[in-house]
Image (tube, coloured by chain):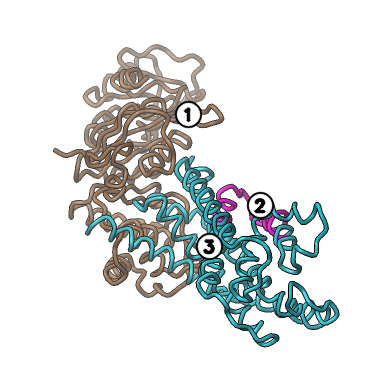
Amino acid sequence: MTQALEIQDLRKQYDNGFQALKGIDLSVEEGDFYALLGPNGAGKSTTIGIISSLVRKSSGSVSVFGHDIDTDLVKAKRMLGVVPQEFNFNQFEKVEDIIVTQAGYYGIPAKEARSRAEKYLKQLGLWDKRHNVSRMLSGGMKRRLMIVRALVHQPKLLILDEPTAGVDIELRRSLWDFLREINEQGTTIILTTHYLEEAEQLCRNIGIIDRGEIVENTSTKELLSKLQQESFVLDLNKPIDDLPTFAGYTVKKVDNSSIEVEVGKHQGVNDLFQQLSEYRIEVASMRNKSNRLEELFVNLTSDTNEPANGSAVEKRGSAQ
Amino acid sequence: MSEWKYNLVAFNTIFSKEIRRFMRIWPQTLLPPAITMSLYFVIFGAVIGSRVGEMGGFDYMTFVVPGLVMMAVITNSFSNVASSFFSNKFQKSIEELLVSPVPNWIILAGYTMGGVVRGLYVGILVMILGAFFVELQVHHMLITLLAVFLTATLFALGGFINAVFARKFDDVAIIPTFVLTPLTYLGGVFYSVDVLPEPFRSLSMLNPILYQVNAFRYGILGQDSGISIGWAFVVMIVAIVIMAAWALHLLRVGKGLRN
């Protein structure tokens, strides 16, 4: 299958010496809905900046639908639509003018551009605002305006950097529906997000980037299956001073009256409770520590926590 | 669609966006030069000029009108590109262009021609205002048009380079204040270099604006200032080639634009 995006050994060192990307490899297949997750400063926006040619890479290669950005940049750019994190349109121009102007940069004549602008502005509920000056729009409308702008030349690959940041729940859901729809119609989508639920809901594949390295790159399903190792918090009836050793479980003391246990998918909790009884530790209540994907994310991107599983450690090692 | 058609649409898009911008904010772009130049006409031409007598073989008012037209063209073509491009940089809307497949030379041509049109627009406006004070006849239409077009192009390119280097709004005003204004005032707008003693006359010959103003004045009045018109055009064309190459180089390396 054609690769919508192929990144090999991509490195970026900024002038101040900061190494934002330490040699990442990434490939996204045509038609995919891919999430690039990572904490702030992990290298997500630098990666998007390099793909869209706003940031110069130090080394490595990037190609969009087979067009290398070093040797075939114009064709690569025609395939690509980018919705950046920050608002980057002219605040003094009217909504429709912004879209038609952007289309013009891709060689689309004004008449055709206006008809495409109408189609997408209507789809994203901005048609009534087409004559408004863009700075007068609300935050959610500005974000939708940037999506329309990125779609007007009908790119085969759409990259969205935090598309739903600061957007209310209702609008977020409607944007999700819209993105699902254009993905079903054939547009490959890559998004970065802080909302892990968003990645879980929308994306078929997920890459996790941390400190300039890809630490996980797999299907959402597989990633979540790894999370069948869940963390539970157990509140105790009586405080304990020292934590005994539990065979087969990783147990941490949160404080004197609560402990945290990692339980594998096929492991069950019966054996845990048996051991607790043997140590005469009485459990008052039990709860999940956090959302599943969130837990994996924290494990993969944190120094202090133990990795969620061995494969993540290996992948982190191999990416170095 | 062929590549040149893409480029033509892209050029038209940038060019018409630039014209739309300065027309939309006409109280900031068209009105001030009209008022300033009218004041120059009244003060230097009518009030002071009547006491100056002749300059370069013409009454002072007639002499000063072509100079003031050129001053308006230089200032406006420069500041149009400098403000517009810097403002796009500042608002990050320049990224719309940078992510698109528009070639650098089309970006430069679009902005430059936008500045040229603003320069010509204001030049014509000043010319019309000047016609209220003196009777003007264009002696050499081709030389007049060529001189004004090349001058506007050169300073529009200068405005572009200024905007590329500018990091804050103050930087956009540095070149006009410290370079353009002195060179324009000393470039034969208000006097003929013949009246200067040496070494100031020879020093003035190093000022490129002198050649443009004199070429334009020759086109309008037919006045021979002792500076070869052919040489004036060579200076302008060479300067345009150097500035355009510099601007394209800055775009290629992404100076101030790409990280």
Image point 39% across, 37% down: which residue?
Answer: A47
Percent of width and height locating residue A220: 25, 37
Image point 76% across, 77% down: which residue?
Answer: B60
Residue type, label 1? Gln
User: SS of the residue at dot 2?
Assistant: helix
Residue under pointer 2: B171
Percent of width and height locating residue B180: 68, 58
Q: Does residue B153 appear to the left or right of A206 in the view shown?
A: right
| Nearest to the observer: residue B11 or residue A80 | B11
Percent of width and height locating residue B150: 53, 62
Q: Does residue A282 appear to the left or right of A106 in the view shown?
A: right
In the depicted structure, whether residue B6 falls above or below residue A276 = below
Q: Nearer the viewer, mark 1 or mark 3?
A: 3
Which region of the structure is painted magenta? B157-181
Q: Is residue B111 magenta?
A: no
Residue under pointer 3: B150
Q: Does residue B200 appear to the left or right of A23 in the view shown?
A: right
Q: Quadrant of residue A293?
A: top left
Quarter of the image for the N terminus of chain B: give it. bottom left
Q: Does residue B194 appear to the left or right of B148 in the view shown?
A: right
| CA separation in Å, label 2 and label 3 | 25 Å
Q: Chain of mark 1?
A: A
Check residue A149 in the rendering and tell me which mark sits there, or answer none: none
Chain B drawn colour: cyan
| CA separation in Å, label 2 and label 1 | 28 Å
Residue under pointer 1: A13
Of all residues shown, which one is farthest toward the left? A1
Q: Quadrant of residue B118?
A: bottom right
Q: Chain of mark 3?
A: B
Chain A drawn colour: brown
Q: Is residue B173 magenta?
A: yes
Q: What's the magenta bit mostly, secondary-structure-wise?
A: helix
